[in-house]
Image (cartoon, rainbow, N blue to C red):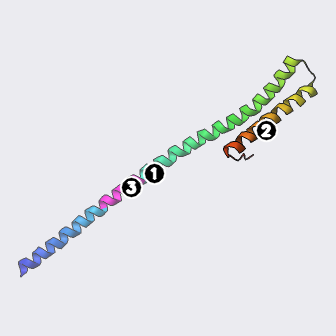
Amino acid sequence: MIAKRLDESLAARNKLYEANQQHRLEICNMKLQIKNLEEEKSRLQEENSKLQQQVQAADACKYSIFFLDFAWSIIITKKPFHQVLQMTILDWLQHLKLLWMWSMKEGHQIVP
């Protein structure tokens, strides 16, 4: 009778020990997942920051190209400022019209 009780106690203790080990293993795995997710988050934040800088640089280039195109047109054509401005505006409007027609054909929506 005592031996049977001891066996039952040992079996219960072993189950509790195994459950405790399993629980600790799950906690370690969760901590590892959290660490990996935090590293991924940090990496994505850095990547996002770099992409934001690239977008800002692209926006700046877009305006620089416009003004360089404008200045180059004045130099090459040797026309007065207002005529070049008028031609440049018409050029850009034509580009916008082509972009809009392409976007409608492709099913894209242009958002300003």
The residue beneath circle 1 is: 37
Q: Amino acid at mark 1?
A: Leu
The residue beneath circle 2 is: 97
**What secondary structure is the magenta-colored segment mainly?**
helix
Which of discs 2 and 3 lies nearer the camera? The answer is 2
Asked which quadrant contains residue 26, the reply is: bottom left
93 left or right of 49 in image: right
Q: Amino acid at mark 2?
A: Lys
Residue drawn 79% across the image and 30% down it: 66
Disc 3 crowd rating (10 Å Cα; few below 14, some 14-19, many 20+) is few
Circle number at residue 31: 3
Q: Say if mark 2 contacts mark 3, CB within 8 Å.
A: no
Front-lying residue, 21 or 85: 85
Residue drawn 43% across the image and 54% down it: 34
Residue drawn 14% across the image and 71% down it: 10
Circle number at residue 77: none
Front-lying residue, 109 or 21: 109
The span picked out in magenta is: 24-33
- The mark that comes first in sequence, 2 or 3, is 3
Asked which quadrant contains residue 52, the reply is: top right
